[in-house]
Each structure stands twice: as C-alpha cells, then as structure tokens.
Image: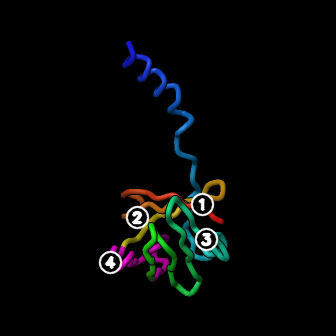
Amino acid sequence: MWKFFAVLIALLAAPLFASASYTKISEKTEFLKVVQGKTLTRPLIKLEVSSAGNISGRGASWNVNGKWTWQNGYFCRNLNWGGTELGYNCQEVGLSNGRLRFTSDEGRGNSAEFRLR
C-alpha cells in the first residue's frame, strides 16, 4: 500500500520538477552578453567566464581554471579542477530565467545548470 502512495506522489509531483525550457545560445556575442560581469553559481561552485577566454573560480574548495573558445555554435572549454585536468569538451549552452545550462558533447551528454549572479 505504501509503495502505491509513493508512486502516486512521485507521478503527481513530476511536473513540478520538470526541466525548464531553455533557449539555445548559438552565438558568441549573445553568450558574452549573458555572462559579462556575472558569476555562474551552483552548490559549492562559483565560476567566472571572461571575454578574453579565461575561466576561473572555485569548486568544492578547489581552484578551477581553464580556457574557452566559441566554435560552430558551442562553448568549447578545457578545465583544470584542483590539479585534475577535466579535458576539452564542446558544450551546448541554453538560457532560461537567469540560468545557464551547459550540456556536454555538443548537447548529447550530461548537463550542469548554473545561476547567473
């Protein structure tokens, strides 16, 4: 009986947790307008993305730094997190209600959502 109620509650609550609709950012100039002067935040992470192609900040008490470029409509970056190279990856960027979503592998991989502060 409890399992039935748990499933019912999960089904009813699902629309509340549905992902927001994101508008894809395809141009570097558009991306820069969104991030200029802002800090990208999520729990334990604060990053800044400069127009000069630098990424800097902190992630779970370790330094994060890297470089980025814009290629064929994607944010392409190489990151180092606390001394560990995270590698090069081109990511689709979406914007919704003051949040940026980066989806790895040109939009086919995992996503990370950041608030703009």
Quadrant housing residue 116: bottom right
Q: Earlier in the sequence, mark 2 or mark 1?
A: 2
> Considering the numbered disc 4 on the image, is that residue within a helix, a strand or a loop?
strand
Q: Most extreme residue toward the bottom, as rendered?
A: 52
* Residue topped by disc 4: 85
Residue at 48% in and 24% down: 9
* Residue topped by disc 1: 115
Label 2 crowd bin: few (<14), some (14–19), many (20+), radius 10 Å:
some
* Residue 14 drawn above or below residue 45: above
Q: Circles 3 and 4: CB distance less than 8 Å?
A: no
Q: Is residue 30 magenta?
A: no
Label 3 crowd bin: few (<14), some (14–19), many (20+), radius 10 Å:
some
Q: Quadrant of the N terminus?
A: top left
In this view, the residue in front, 44 or 68, is 44
* Residue topped by disc 2: 106
Label 1 crowd bin: few (<14), some (14–19), many (20+), radius 10 Å:
some
